[in-house]
Image (cartoon, rainbow, N blue to C red):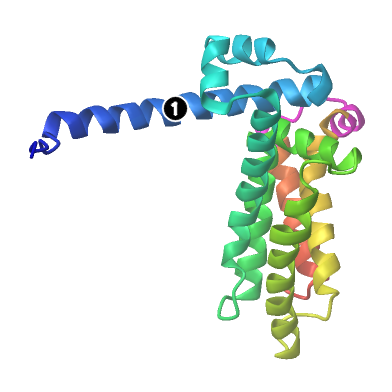
Amino acid sequence: MIALSSPTPDDAADEAAKGTIRQSNEALILAAAEQVFAGAGFSGATMAAIAEACGLPKANLHYYFGSKQVLYRAVLARTLTDWLVPAHGITPEADPRTAIEAYLRAKMALSALRPHASRVFANELLHGAPVLGELLATELRDMVREKAAVIDGWIAAGRMAPVDSTHLFFTLWAATQTYADFDVQVSAVLGRPGLAPAEHARATEHVVQLVLRGCGLL
């Protein structure tokens, strides 16, 4: 029988380094893909353009994601996941004002930090969600049902004003994502070339105050 040698500390270090490099490259590719898909749409985007945007060889993109379709799906899935995470704070034992305010601020921050991701997501929906349809009807719907039930419990306990808990989420998404999806419109009306951090902070405070008042939490 041939004895198998145990992994050495150097082997473990090499594997860890490879994992770190992979994560770094995947994040770089996804960020570039968000930008290219947002500007050109799925049909107009190319792997070559994404490779140029992230500064990696096109072969690396195919190594990590296989095809443009796989990369596009990864961009959408990451965006949806990142949008769902802030909702984890909406739990029965949480303070309604704190939980809803934290969710709003997180979504506004994502609109500022990752506007391209929001635009790719919006464009997917405008085209009938051919890729995201199943995720919307399962993962997203399940999350909304779960969190809407929490909000209904808060309302029943007199902890916030009566609202339609399901449609509240549509309102929250519209109020926060508009600053990414329609920033050109917002900037034009404000007479600015773009939304500076101070202007985005002003918008965040407006959205937070408006929603909290509507929910009877101010």
Indicate whether residue 189 is drawn in magenta: yes
Rendered location of residue 131, percent (x, y): 78, 41
* Residue at the extreme bottom: 157
Rendered location of residue 5, percent (x, y): 10, 35
User: What kind of residue is marked 1?
Assistant: Ser
Residue at which label 1 appears: 24
Element on which disc 1 rests: helix
In the drawing, does residue 51 fall left or right of residue 120?
left
Indicate whether residue 186 is drawn in magenta: yes
Image quadrant containing the N terminus: top left
Rendered location of residue 74, percent (x, y): 63, 36
**Magenta segment boundaries in residue numbering:** 185-198
The part of the image, by quadrant, that contains residue 123 is top right
* Residue at the extreme front: 1
In the drawing, does residue 142 fall left or right of residue 130?
left
Task: Tell me: residue 127, above or below residue 153.
Answer: above
The part of the image, by quadrant, that contains residue 50 is top right
Task: Tell me: residue 83, above or below residue 149.
Answer: above
Task: Tell me: residue 218, above or below residue 178.
Answer: below
How many discs appear? 1
Q: Nearer the viewer, residue 104 or 114?
A: 114
Image quadrant containing the C terminus: bottom right
The part of the image, by quadrant, that contains residue 180 is top right
Q: Nearer the viewer, residue 41 or 108?
A: 41
Q: Is residue 133 visible?
A: yes
Q: Is residue 218 visible?
A: no
What's the residue at 72%, 78% (across, down)? 149
What's the residue at 76%, 18% (across, down)? 45
What's the residue at 85%, 43% (across, down)? 125
Rendered location of residue 215, percent (x, y): 79, 72
Few, some or many residues within 10 Å of mark 1 (<14, 14–19, 20+): few
